[in-house]
Amino acid sequence: MEPSALATGFFIASAFQARHDTVLDTFRKRLIGACGPIGIEETLLNQAIIQARQVLADVTESIRTGQIQVDETAIALAWQAGAARAMGNLHPVESLRAATELFDPVLDAVIETAAGQPDAACIVRTATQALQRSVMTRVRWASEAYVGFLLDRVQQAQLAERRRIARELHDRVGGSASVVTRNLELAKAYADTDQDRSHDKVDVAYRASVQTLEAVRGVATDLRLESKFDNLEQALRGFLDVMGEGNAAVDLAVSGDEAWIPAEVLAEVFLVVREALRNAFRHSQAQTILSHVDIAPHEIRVWVSDDGVGFDPDYGGCTGGSGLASMGERVELLGGKLFLHSSPGRGTRVEAFIPLSGTSR
């Protein structure tokens, strides 16, 4: 850059830097006026202001030197902001929307500052390119942090599901299989000394082997139901047929058009409802279980209610705790919220709200 251009760049950069607070104030007001999550939540708003201040520093330095400058050491804060937003179920699109609110105040300030100065067009072009690169670099890093966080959550959900399957095998198959083995051992031991007793043990082992086979089929059916299916209500009714536990009467209803739900979301909704029903069957001692799935174009509402023994959520109890945690994680990954209502002697109600518009409630 020519000495005269450097001098002009230095002058405009200094004048533009004096406008930083005004630009940030305008940016803050635009975010609040947009009524998005970042403008509403004070912590997110302050993070956005910090990021904007760093963007202004990049633009200022680019004007001063005549070269595009992006401070890579400050990008780590964008990663941290992306992870924090992911923990709050805030989609990266909200970061991009916030970034668009920054462009006009910054460019307006640059143009006003450079107006009438030599090489104004060149300086404005440099500032625009620096603004675009600084903003998009931060959005990219924040998005990568968001994806990394979600992948970690998915892995945790998968591990929880594997542990659940292991428990299913232990509880539903392992016990009866142990009975088979023990009674066959006893039958062998009595074979030479007490034929009648030996035959009794063989009969017990036979009945236990039948129960084991039925349990294996039940687990296998559960796993098949976790794969792709075409109809949510049919899949849930198939699960209810397989359960065959207790004397509780079940009222299941699915309303709305399932075509509004993406296939991957539909599968997760099935797993959430299935786990809620499983808990009700196993722990509630209920006479009646109600399960409804209401599908609207903008959201899914799920609730499973029983008239069973209930429990105090603050003190745990027979709640299928890991199952509830798994349900909560699945719903949160879909951007939704899970609510649990229960008290001793007054039954339990599990509710989930899952948005279909791509934004959290």
Image (cartoon, rainbow, N blue to C red):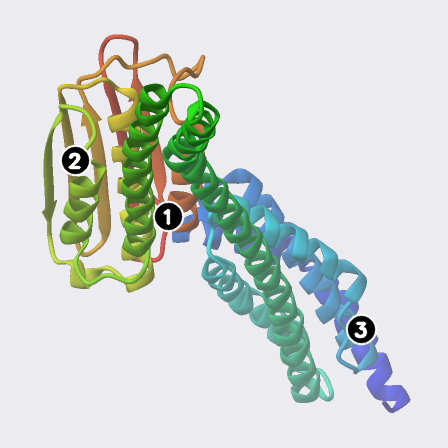
Q: Which mark is residue 284?
A: none
Q: Image point 44% across, 20% down: which residue?
A: 193
Towards the viewer: 52 or 337: 337
Front of the two marks 2 and 3: 2
Point 14% across, 52% down: residue:
234
Which label was assigned to residue 291? Answer: 2
Residue extending furthest front? Answer: 192
Number of numbered callouts drawn: 3
Crowding at label 3, few (<14), some or many (≥20) Cα neighbours within 10 Å? some
Element at label 1: loop
The three-letter code of the residue at mark 2 reads: Ser
Q: CA distance from mark 2 to mark 1?
A: 23 Å
**Residue in front for this viewpoint, 253 or 75:** 253
Q: Are marks 2 and 3 in contact (CB under 8 Å)?
A: no
Q: Residues within 10 Å of mark 1 (few under 14, many from 20)?
A: some
Give how far across and how far down residue 148 sits, in percent.
Answer: 60, 58
Query: Which numbered disc flags the more N-terminal residue, 1 or 3?
Result: 3
Q: CA distance from mark 2 to mark 3?
A: 69 Å
Callout in the foreground (2, 1):
2
Pick whichever, 300 or 184, lies toward us. Answer: 184
Residue occupied by mark 1: 360
The x, y position of residue 62, in whole percent, is 76, 75
Q: Is residue 334 above or below residue 166?
A: below
Q: Residue at x 83, y 78 (%)?
A: 65
According to the picture, the residue beneath numbered tag 3 turns out to be: 11
Q: Disc 3 residue type?
A: Phe
Amino acid type of the residue tagged 1 in the rendering: Ser
* The C terminus, quarter of image: top left
